[in-house]
Amino acid sequence: MDREALRVLVWKHECSARPSVAPKEEIGTMSIPRFVVAAAAAVSLAAPAFAEDLTVVFKATGGDKVGTSTAYYSAEKMRTTSDGAGDLIVEYGPGRIVTIDHKRKEYSEITMAEMDAALSRMAAQMQEQMAALPPAMRQMMGDTAAAVTVTKGAVRKVAGYDCQDYTLALGTSSTTQVCASTAVAPPAVKVDYRRYATLGGMASSPLFKSFAKIADEMKKIQGFVLAESSSVKMMGRSVQSSREATEVRPGPIAGSVFDVAAVAPGYKKVPHPLTQTK
């Protein structure tokens, strides 16, 4: 998994933490956070050019809610914050993801290996449940047979940078819009991406195939994504979420920004939800 893939994974994780932005999707008796669904697609996204540390402030929307999130990128770690409600810190080298809940004053950890195992178990469960559903119900879960169409839009300014608009549509079930800028360049990530290659196997699950198709097209888009939005129709519901950069600050980031002890002082460590799946 490359740095840009992790960025997308973090955004989906961030959305899943806010029910008003992106509620859980239900398949039969099983609920799946959207960031888990996004993981299969994210592993194949391309990373942009290499540069110095980067801080990006985003305006995030979902439903009737509007908030702010900040993303910090260094060569070794990444962190996102969401209106003071929660943080997520990714340590590339050890492949560790730390989720912080400021309201509950708790934090949890999961490694990429643990996530890989959990996602594999969930994929197997989804395949079994999808196979038991009537054809009409499987169709309602998403148009997995549809091809992805990519439309190149106009060049516009986002946070003072030129970026290129693209719209990726998967039939009528999913639409993703991104605006990518080659003028913004996060730092190189010090990690062996091959360690996370097995996550790509999640795309074999029927539900993940749709997202994998979008990820394949995303590989062709160059630059850092300054704005993105998604609309997914499933089970008769439509879920929208978006975010757009309002400020981009290149320059060194203090180590304390990524220090769990500094960000979550005295917080209780609890098991990560994915490590509890059977």
Image (tube, rainbow, N blue to C red):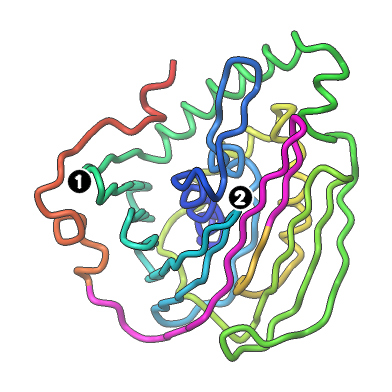
Q: Which residues are magenta?
A: 230-254
What's the mark number on residue 105?
1
Residue plotted at (67% across, 74% down) = 180
- Image depth: mark 1 or mark 2 in front: 1
Left or right: residue 165 compared with residue 6: right
Q: Residue type at mark 1: give it.
A: Lys
In this rendering, the count of numbered labels is 2
Nearest to N terminus: mark 1 or mark 2: 2
Tell me the distance, in whole angstroms, between the alpha carbons under discs 1 and 2.
29 Å
Compared to residue 102, the image places residue 255 above or below, namely below
Please tell me whether residue 143 is drawn above or below residue 223 in the rendered image. above
Residue at 58% of width from left, 72% of height from top?
244
Asked if the magenta segment contains residue 79, the reply would be no
* Numbered label attached to residue 42: 2
Label the magenta part by its dominant secondary structure.
strand
Question: Quarter-wise, where is residue 75 in the image?
Answer: bottom left
| Residue 74 image offset from top left, x and y in percent | 37, 71
Please tell me whether residue 168 is drawn above or below residue 162 in the rendered image.
above
> Which residue of the protein is positioned furthest toward the left in this rendering?
266
Name the quadrant containing residue 168: bottom right
